[in-house]
Amino acid sequence: MELGILAVVLAAGLGALSQVHRMSKASRRQFFVAFAAYLVFAACGVAAVVMLPFRPGSNVVAAAAVVFILDWSMLAMLWAARLAQRSEAPTGWVLKPWSVLDWVLIAIAIGAAGLGSLW
């Protein structure tokens, strides 16, 4: 399961990596910083799924683990979008750090982790 999650996390960045050759040198450096931060964040999420005391054998636990890792990946992509500089700026609510969206994603991750470990 962990290798499949890792494959999804890496595949999420491949589309952005394919655009690197069109960037200027400064933008390329900024992109690699954002991508490295995304990979570290995603690795922390995978480590949390592996280390959390999920009880095996339940569909609810499996769903909670999937919701947690997908939610954590969305949070990582949101922060990577804030770090990466590009020609077209995203909307204002994406660029605002610690917005309502951040707290909603964090609450979903905590809820999924709690549900998976308590069920």
Image (tube, rainbow, N blue to C red):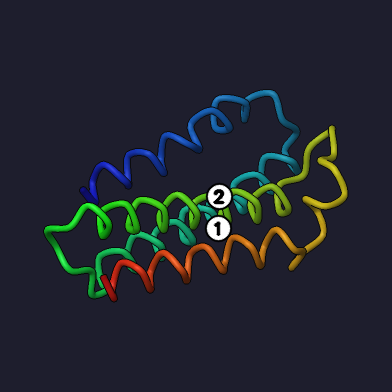
Position in image of residue 69 (x %, y %): 40, 54
Which quarter of the figure is the C terminus placed in?
A: bottom left
Q: Secondary structure at mark 2?
A: helix
Tell me whether the residue at label 1 lies in contact with that at label 2, contact meaning CB atoms closer than 8 angstroms: no
| Residue under the image location 67 percent in, 40 percent down | 28
Most extreme residue toward the right is 92
Position in image of residue 44 (x %, y %): 41, 65
Q: Is residue 83 above or below residue 99?
A: above
- Label 1 belongs to which residue? 37
Amino acid carrying mark 1 in the image: Ala
| Relative depth, front residue between 72 and 20 | 72
- Label 2 belongs to which residue? 74
Does label 1 or label 2 sit earlier along the sequence?
1
| Relative depth, front residue between 44 and 92 | 92
How much space separates mark 1 and mark 2, taking CA atoms? 13 Å
Position in image of residue 83 (x %, y %): 71, 54
Rate crowding at label 1 as few (under 14), some (14 to 19) or many (20 or more) other CA atoms within 10 Å: some
Q: Is residue 20 above or below residue 52?
A: above
Q: Is residue 106 above or below residue 6?
A: below
